[in-house]
């Protein structure tokens, strides 16, 4: 380039590289464990605040990982009757229930052709470790129908190695359609009240249509049943992040 | 109600009771009341003074305290008399103590004999004519009358009942909350009377309680949470059996 006075051009530093940090985008859709959200009721919010303080205390000492229904977990609990004084159980999480300190989750596995379900309390002091072996969501939030499905869908290898996962990847949804044992089932899973999308119903057409008799299409428009948790969730997220940083 | 775990890993259910604006209202001496001990009137939970006439506000005016929703009496010995107007806090109780909790049970309205008294009723089929939940016979032939107190349908609930011998597991001094073992009569957020247990097994149980009561302006500085020795505190690591 030709300069105005004939001197060499002034040194222009190269433009700084722009780093797009994809990790910051994940902060917006953070996971809030469902037991933190208080149910709708007449109780004093002070009670839920005090419970949350206890839950945060426990989470500071013991790591409760983020998990959903459909994940494969390994739980080690303290057992006074076992020889090692601890017992390990691996299984698929089929249900998460309860609010506050009494929150529970049910793990299912088939061991030596016997289906076994164990209901653990998240905040029980006897739990020594919770490891997430495989992360995968399912189409439904309640996998109780696995009891009536073929046992191959509930078997989980006890010596499974944890599947590695990057932090910023989204949790994959397993769209498997589960095949069922012949009827009778423990619950009539074809009825619309359970709203199950993960079963491959091999029932005849007229039975599926007869099940739609029990549908209640007015339920989704019922305004009294609406429970908008977005504001409550924001407050609780703020509280959690403040307390966990301390 | 909340779960609580002990150091050996056992779970107990616990009810949370909040001490909300409790003040001593009046001292009634033994001769005045005509009983065996002196009495202290205690009121709890402030409420608007505009819904009652001025005559009802006399007790509260003497003690210098806003109108209370509930006024109860406690029988006290002469060395435990407190001056009217002193506030009472949850720290009056200590973990490891045993208490009796009195409250009005949930009102169920007019109920039949099966729900109210647990009668078995009659079978659903096999020829029963219009008789499935009735009391059946109410007396014998020779009695020629129905005895007083015969269990019959009527208004059920909304009466005072007490749960005895409940252990105090934990006390929160900042929010004035008492964690009491087991369940307590009454609906959620109802008014409740908590008293030292009168059961003979817990007569000598209270080791050095604050006597006559816990005074907030005193020298004692209590931590925010007082725990019983057996409770598993969430600051400890998980329980292991050696």
Image (tube, coloured by chain):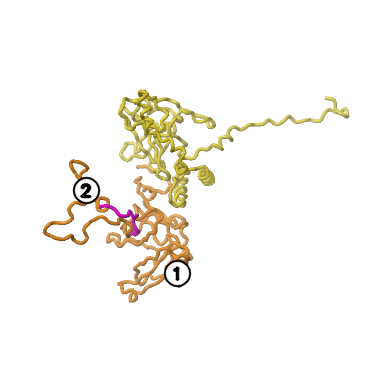
Chain colours: A yellow, B orange
Q: Is residue A187 magenta?
A: no
| Residue at (40% x, 63% y) in the render | B70
Instruction: Work out how far the residue at label 1 is from the one at label 2, CA to CA, in angstroms.
Output: 49 Å
User: Where's residue B178, x and y in %?
Assistant: 40, 56
Q: Height in image: A54 above or below A138?
A: below
If you read the primary sequence from the N terminus, does the residue marked by circle 1 or circle 2 appear first?
A: 1
Q: Height in image: A126 above or below A186?
A: below
Q: Out of B81 and A8, give the one closest to the viewer.
A: B81
User: Where's residue A73, x and y in %?
Assistant: 41, 33
Q: Is residue B235 visible?
A: no
Which image quarter holds the N terminus of chain A? top right
Q: Which quadrant would residue A134 be assigned to in this image?
A: top left
Task: Classify mark 1: helix, strand or loop.
Answer: loop
What type of secondary structure mainly makes up the magenta span? strand
User: Where's residue A31, x and y in %?
Assistant: 50, 38
Q: Residue furthest front?
A: B129
Q: Height in image: B184 above or below B82?
A: above
Chain of the residue under the numbered disc 1 shown in the image: B
Question: What's the magenta region?
Answer: B98-112
Q: Residues within 10 Å of mark 1 (few under 14, many from 20)?
A: few
User: Where's residue B143, x and y in %?
Assistant: 13, 60
Chain of the residue under the numbered disc 2 shown in the image: B
Q: Are marks 1 and 2 in contact (CB under 8 Å)?
A: no
Q: Which quadrant would residue A104 be assigned to in this image?
A: top left
Left or right of A21? Residue B205 is: left
Q: Residue furthest right?
A: A5
Tag 2 residue: B121
Tag 1 residue: B53
Q: Is residue B110 magenta?
A: yes
| Residue at (20% x, 41% y) in the render | B125
């Amino acid at each position: 380039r030709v300069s105005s006075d004939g001197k060499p051009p002034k040194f222009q530093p190269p433009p700084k590289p722009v780093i797009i940090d994809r990790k910051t985008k994940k902060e917006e859709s953070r996971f809030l464990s469902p037991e933190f959200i208080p149910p709708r009721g007449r109780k004093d919010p002070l009670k839920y605040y005090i419970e949350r303080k206890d839950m945060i205390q426990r989470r500071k000492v013991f790591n409760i990982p983020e998990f959903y229904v459909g994940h494969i977990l390994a739980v080690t609990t303290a057992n006074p009757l076992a020889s090692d004084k601890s017992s390990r159980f691996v299984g698929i999480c089929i249900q998460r229930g309860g609010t506050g300190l009494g929150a529970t989750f049910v793990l299912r596995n088939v061991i030596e052709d016997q289906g076994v379900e164990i209901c653990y309390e998240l905040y029980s002091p006897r739990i020594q470790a919770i490891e997430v072996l495989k992360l995968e969501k399912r189409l439904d939030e309640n996998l109780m129908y696995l009891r009536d499905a073929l046992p191959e869908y509930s078997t989980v290898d006890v010596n499974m190695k944890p599947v590695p996962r990057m932090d910023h990847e989204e949790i994959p949804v397993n769209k498997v359609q589960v095949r069922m044992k012949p009827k009778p089932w423990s619950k009539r899973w074809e009825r619309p009240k359970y709203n199950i999308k993960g079963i491959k119903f091999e029932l005849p057409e007229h039975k599926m249509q007869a099940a739609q008799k029990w549908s209640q299409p007015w339920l989704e428009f019922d305004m009294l049943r609406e429970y908008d948790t977005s504001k409550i969730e924001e407050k609780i997220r703020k509280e959690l992040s403040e307390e966990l940083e301390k | 109600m909340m779960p609580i775990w002990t150091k050996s890993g056992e779970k107990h259910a616990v009810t949370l009771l909040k001490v909300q604006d409790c003040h001593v209202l009046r001292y009634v001496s033994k001769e005045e009341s005509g009983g065996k001990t002196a009495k202290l009137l205690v009121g709890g939970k402030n409420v608007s003074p505009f819904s009652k006439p001025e005559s009802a506000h006399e007790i509260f005016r003497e003690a210098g305290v806003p109108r209370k929703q509930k006024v109860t009496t406690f029988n006290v010995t002469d060395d435990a008399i407190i001056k009217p107007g002193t506030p009472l806090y949850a720290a009056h109780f200590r973990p490891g103590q045993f208490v009796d909790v009195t409250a009005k049970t949930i009102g169920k309205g007019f109920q039949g004999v099966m729900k109210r008294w647990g009668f078995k009723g009659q079978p659903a089929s096999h020829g029963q004519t219009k008789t499935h939940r009735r009391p059946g016979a109410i007396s014998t032939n020779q009695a020629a009358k129905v005895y007083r107190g015969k269990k019959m349908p009527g208004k059920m609930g909304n009466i005072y009942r007490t749960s005895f011998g409940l252990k105090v597991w934990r006390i929160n001094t900042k929010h004035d909350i008492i964690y009491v073992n087991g369940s307590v009569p009454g609906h959620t957020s109802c008014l409740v009377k908590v008293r030292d247990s009168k059961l003979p097994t817990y007569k000598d149980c209270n080791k050095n309680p604050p006597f006559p009561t816990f005074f907030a302006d005193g020298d004692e500085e209590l931590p925010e949470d007082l725990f019983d020795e057996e409770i598993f505190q969430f600051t400890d690591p998980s329980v292991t059996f050696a």
